[in-house]
Image: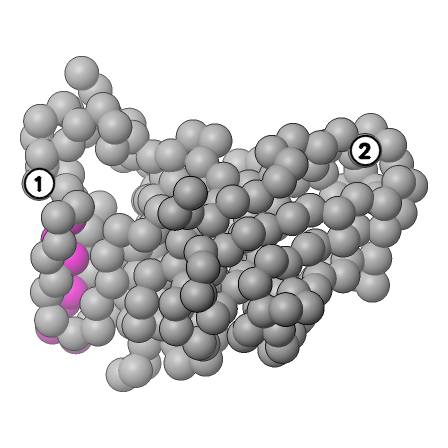
Amino acid sequence: DAKTTQPNSMESNEEEPVHLPCNHSTISGTDYIHWYRQLPSQGPEYVIHGLTSNVNNRMASLAIAEDRKSSTLILHRATLRDAAVYYCIRASQNEKLTFGTGTRLTIIP
Amino acid sequence: GAGVSQSPRYKVAKRGQDVALRCDPISGHVSLFWYQQALGQGPEFLTYFQNEAQLDKSGLPSDRFFAERPEGSVSTLKIQRTQQEDSAVYLCASSLISGTALITEAFFGQGTRLTVV
């Protein structure tokens, strides 16, 4: 039970922003939201995580809805190297990271 | 290297053969995880170590699967009497803090692709 819902696939033009949505309507107050991505033939790579407030790092931004039932991963300027499967993961205390099937992001040159 | 290293990268085994997959985590990382990833699917949790202690093995699919981390660093995932359904990529991850990587990132290796013929 991945406990999150993501679109199976999305496309975006190169050099434009990308907004990847995730629904986690049954989230509890102590659950974190993690995002990982997996490039072809690679292991998953950490992108960002957050609890309540919006988060920014060098890779992306994470916008968490006020009710925390959804979040959006924002890639500010997509490049071809951002083509990957993006996993949104709801992580509870003392639980392992449980991956779903993710969103396959295609970048169009 | 600074990352998680897994070996071999590829393994072909005949059905019924035993295999051993190795994971070298990042030095000093307390937590170590094994995941199994079938083609087209997300990674599925197998087992978790905190140092040398195996605290969660709830994801191991059968008693043919065994994992160890005897000195709290290198880990080995062993699969006995391999079956075709064991064909998958086996991923190892480590993180600095004990627990489930809840408050820090987990670092994954490139995985070992096991094909059972």
Residue B70, disc: none
Q: Determine if marks 2 and 1 fall on one subunit.
A: no
Q: Is residue B117 left or right of residue B75?
A: right
Which residue occupies 81% across, 33% down?
B13
- A24 and B12: which one is in front? B12
Residue at the image position 17 percent from the left and 27 percent from the top: A79
Residue sitting nearer the eye, A39 or A109: A39
Mark 1 — residue?
A76
Q: Residue B13 carries which label?
A: 2
Kindly identify the amino acid type of the residue bearing the numbered disc 1: His
Disc 1 sits on a residue from what chain?
A
The residues colored magenta run A60-67
Residue A27 appears in the rendering: no
Would you place residue B60 above or below residue A105 in this image?
Answer: below
Q: Is residue A28 above or below residue B61?
A: below
Q: Where is residue A45 in the image (x, y as percent from the top left)?
A: 35, 47
